[in-house]
Image (cartoon, rainbow, N blue to C red):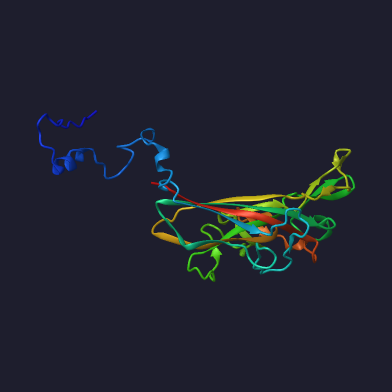
Amino acid sequence: MSRIVTERVKDGEVIAAADLNTRFTDYTQTTLNAFNVRDAAVDLPAFSDTDFMVPFVQSDNIGKNDLFTTAPVTVNGIGALPDAGYVVGDGVSDTIATYVGGLAVTADDVLRVYWHLNVNALYTGTPWLDFAGTIDDYVLTDGAGTSKVSTNATCWAAYLQWDITSAALLNWTEVDKQSDFTTVAGARTGNSLAQCMATSVTPCFRTSEKALDREPDAAELHGFVNWSGMNGAYYYTPAAGTTTIYGIRIVLKGPMHPWNNGGLNYLVHTTGIVAGANMTLEYTSGTISTIKQRLS
């Protein structure tokens, strides 16, 4: 490999500022790249105070602080469309991750967003059986004719919105590669999976089917999922230019169900199983963590 050779200072030689300032010029690198440095040559602790790789990290509390779940916020299922969904808040005001002066993300960055919300899905009756024309059940043939059993795929959805216009936070839209579940898909309304890149889900209920003589028994077992974490992750890099983010929030919609239309997979509203408040989602506290990481 090539070597840099610099003459030593000799005995009796006058030390001058000009010489000292230029003596190590040959060692100067104006850029760090794959050709002149390897990660093993970098003392990473030296960058601990320089935000070298991660220039921005922030964690925000969302939802309602209710450690013992004695008074959670309750969201009713959507029985008629269109519906704007429910913005996660403390029961009085929306809880939002905001960024002072705006968080600028360029094509050299990756925005990483992680979220968590404590949720509890509730229902009354057997919604997948109690209403005609739902997509939440399978119809199976047995010796007595047919039986219905739950698909066990009905869920609540949480997805991200951001404001990339101003700190006034008056122009909320879905983040890149995420839609608001209003796309018409045949007889249903929802999102294609390609537009669910900032969506997380939690089950509406859990069921199991007893078998009698190798056939479904009418007494289908079912129960609540109980309190659990609803977690999600989202990654974003602008194709070009800069995106400045002033706020991020979470919206809840449900109940939802998988659906196929024209060969494409969707997550759609299943409004047929909602009657009043028979489908609800309780939630308490959670967090949104925002990380901006350098790509190069």
- The residue positioned 53% from the left and 57% from the top of the image is 177
Q: Pinpoint residue 277: horizontal percent, then vertical percent.
A: 79, 64
Apparent side of residue 288 relative to residue 237 in the rendered image (left or right): right
Q: Pinpoint residue 196: horizontal percent, then vertical percent.
A: 58, 55
- The residue positioned 71% from the left and 54% from the top of the image is 119
- The residue positioned 13% from the left and 38% from the top of the image is 15
Quadrant position of residue 279: bottom right
Apparent side of residue 55 relative to residue 26 in the rendered image (left or right): right
Apparent side of residue 79 relative to residue 197 in the rendered image (left or right): right
Q: Pinpoint residue 103: horizontal percent, then vertical percent.
A: 46, 59
Q: Pinpoint residue 38: horizontal percent, then vertical percent.
A: 36, 35
Disc tally is 0
Q: Nearer the viewer, residue 112 or 47?
A: 47
Split into 4 quadrants, where in the image is the N terminus? top left
Whether residue 133 is visible, yes or no, is no
Whether residue 79 is visible, yes or no, is yes
- The residue positioned 84% from the left and 50% from the top of the image is 147
Q: Is residue 106 above or below residue 9?
A: below
Q: Nearer the viewer, residue 194 or 164?
A: 164
